[in-house]
Amino acid sequence: MAALFELLPIVLFFVAFKLAGIYVATGVIIVTSVIQLGVGWLRERRLKPMPLAVTGLAVVLGGITIALHDPLFIKWKFSVVYWLFGLVFIGSQFIGEKALVERALGSQLSLPRPVWNRL
């Protein structure tokens, strides 16, 4: 159920895109991302980094898309998100004692250090 909740803005974006076009869909992803972030705050009383970054990019790039009436900016959102995640994963190799993957999954898996670094 949590995975469906995380995908809700994207699903609603594509539904709105098919029904009303890119600019309405951009507004929908902005609104649903902000609502999703608010619900996350109400549930856990903290903001997780990933939804915060995704919502921030949706608001900034989506706002530019609507303001300039140029769909190019909202199309950048997904690429920028994946580049940021890639940079965070690479950077985690050099910052701290454990890589990000090991921090996230270390309690569930027991692997030697070289395997964590390759993962």
Image (cartoon, rainbow, N blue to C red):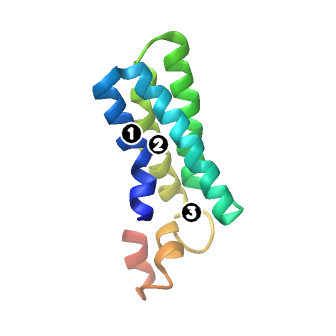
Disc 2 vs disc 1: which is toward the camera? 1
Q: Position of residue 107 (x, y in %)?
A: 50, 85
Q: Which residue is mark 3?
A: 94
The amino acid type found where label 3 is placed reads Phe
* Residue at image coords 42%, 85%: 109
Dot 2 or dot 3: first in sequence order is: 2
Q: Which residue is mark 1?
A: 12
Q: Would you call the spot at circle 1 few (<14 residues within 10 Å), some (14-19), or many (20 or more)?
A: some
Q: Position of residue 78 (x, y in %)?
A: 41, 38
Outermost residue on the front side: it is 19
Residue 69: image tag: none
Q: Is residue 80 above or below residue 39?
A: above
* Residue at image coords 46%, 77%: 105
Q: Position of residue 112 (x, y in %)?
A: 42, 86
Q: Tell whether label 1 touches label 2 (CB within 8 Å).
A: no
Q: Secondary structure at mark 3?
A: loop
Outermost residue on the bottom side: it is 110
Q: Which residue is mark 2?
A: 81
Camera-nearest residue between 19 and 9: 19
Disc 1 vs disc 3: which is toward the camera? 1
The amino acid type found where label 1 is placed reads Leu
Camera-nearest residue between 83 and 12: 12
Disc 2 vs disc 3: which is toward the camera? 2
The amino acid type found where label 2 is placed reads Val
Q: Is residue 15 above or below residue 54?
A: above
* Residue at image coords 44%, 51%: 86
* Residue at image coords 48%, 58%: 89
User: Is 41 situated left or right of 113 in this image?
Assistant: right
Alpha carbons under labels 2 and 1: distance apart: 18 Å
Q: Would you call the spot at circle 2 few (<14 residues within 10 Å), some (14-19), or many (20 or more)?
A: some
